[in-house]
Amino acid sequence: MKKEFDPFKLIMGILSLILAYFVMTRVGITVQVMVILVGIFMLVNGVIRFMGRNKLRKLGMDKTGWLTFSAILDILVGILVLVMPDFGIVYIWILLTIGLFMDSLFELWAARFVKESKGYYWFTIIFAIIGIVLAIIMMFSPALALTFGVALLGAYFMVYGIMEVVEAF
């Protein structure tokens, strides 16, 4: 079976590679855009969840107090991030750091379930420890945390772009 050329995958791949280049070479602007996108996402997500409470009540959820609280908190944080970009930078810094730390702790805990595969087990242990150390360093260095976040974003766009270009042919 012969695979046909997919011009849309090629276009998406090229656009993604261009985006990866801009993300990696313009870290300051990327952080500013990330702050705006996080603020918009939180605001919209909070509004949608707040408006969805009635639907959940119809489906049988008797109490929506925590959902209401969470939705209002998202709306308020979203507004703060958009109005006070420095708050947004701190917010992203803290989320990246805590996220990496918690994920690395989980990987360290979960490694015990793959002990029969020695190579994968040690790979998981080593990278979990590296993640914990990096998260601790990031707690004291917001610039490193934000640069790390931007580098991850750029790497994602680069890998996605390469995959799309390869799949196009």
Image (tube, rainbow, N blue to C red):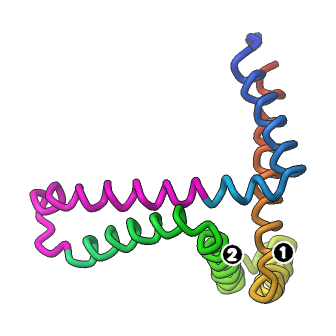
In this rendering, does residue 133 appear at all?
yes
Q: Residue at x 40, y 57 (%)?
A: 45
Which image quadrant is residue 55 in? Answer: bottom left
* Residue 165 drawn above or below residue 123: above
Q: Which residue position holds label 1? A: 144
* Residue 62 drawn above or below residue 16: below
Specify start and end residues of the magenta stretch as a single range. Answer: 36-64
How packed mark 2 is, by other alpha carbons closer than 10 Å (few <14, some 14-19, many 20 or more), is: many
Which image quadrant is residue 54 in? Answer: bottom left
Judged from the image, the secondary structure of the residue bearing numbered disc 1 is helix
Q: Position of residue 3 (x, y in %)?
A: 75, 14
Q: Nearer the viewer, residue 74 or 7?
A: 74
Q: Residue at x 66, y 70 (%)?
A: 89
Q: Which residue position holds label 2? A: 93
**Circle on res. 167:** none
For badge 1, the amino acid type reads: Leu
Q: Quadrant of the C terminus?
A: top right
SS assignment for the magenta stretch, majority = helix
Q: Position of residue 92 (x, y in %)?
A: 64, 71
Q: Nearer the viewer, residue 146 or 165?
A: 146
